[in-house]
Image (cartoon, rainbow, N blue to C red):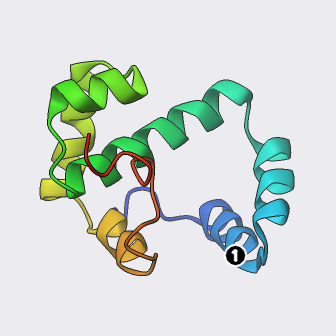
Amino acid sequence: MNLKLKDDHLDFLFQCILSLQTEEECYNFFGDLCTVDELKAMSQRIAIARMLSTKRVYSDIVAQTGASTATISRVNRSLQYGNDGYDIAFNRLPAEAGPDKHNENA
């Protein structure tokens, strides 16, 4: 973890997130916490990370998400040199979960 980020407020945020038990609770909590644009940006980044982790190419990711190649590159750097947070989450999900679950042959 980036120790520069760590503080009591961020700890409390994560404790709140970890207390959520259902997808509906997540929708309610994050709907209150974030703007629509913030949620869309986060969901786009996690979708990009999942697609990169399943070896999708940039052109497919751009077509499916509308993300810029700069955004895709930033997410790719996090996958390559980050804290393995994406991998931890993805490894706990079913293999078919994710943004391209309906496009396996795309």
Residue denoted by label 1: 15
Picture layout, residue 60 above or below residue 28: above
Please report the residue visible at 61 percent of the width from the left and 61 percent of the height from the top.
Answer: 10
Task: For residue 106, say whether it is visible.
Answer: yes
- On screen, residue 42 versus residue 85, left or right, reads right
- The image position of residue 66, as x and y in percent, is 40, 20
35, 56: nearer the viewer: 56
Q: How many labels does the image show?
A: 1
Residue drawn at point x = 46 percent, y = 75 percent:
93
Query: Does dot 1 land on a helix, a strand or a loop?
Result: helix
Q: Which amino acid does label 1 sit on?
A: Gln
Pick the quarter of the image with the N terminus. bottom left
What residue appears at the point 18 percent right and 24 percent down from the top-left corner? 59
Classify 105 as above or below 3.
above
Where is residue 40, by image quadrant? top right
Q: Position of residue 47 (x, y in %)?
A: 42, 45
Seen at 26% across and 39% down, the residue is 106
Location of residue 94 by image quarter:
bottom left
Position of residue 74 measured from the top left corner of the image (x, y, whole percent): 24, 35
Q: Is residue 1 visible?
A: no
In the picture, measured across the screen, residue 64 lies left or right of residue 79, that is right
For mark 1, does the 10 Å Cα neighbourhood hold few (<14), some (14 to 19), or many (20 or more) residues? Answer: few
Q: In this view, does 1 lie above or below 57?
A: below
- Position of residue 92 measured from the top left corner of the image (x, y, whole percent): 43, 81
Horizontal side of 103 relative to 29 (left or right) equals left
Which sits in the foreground, 100 or 14?
A: 100
Figure check: 42 above or below 6: above
**Left or right of 4: which side holds 35?**
right
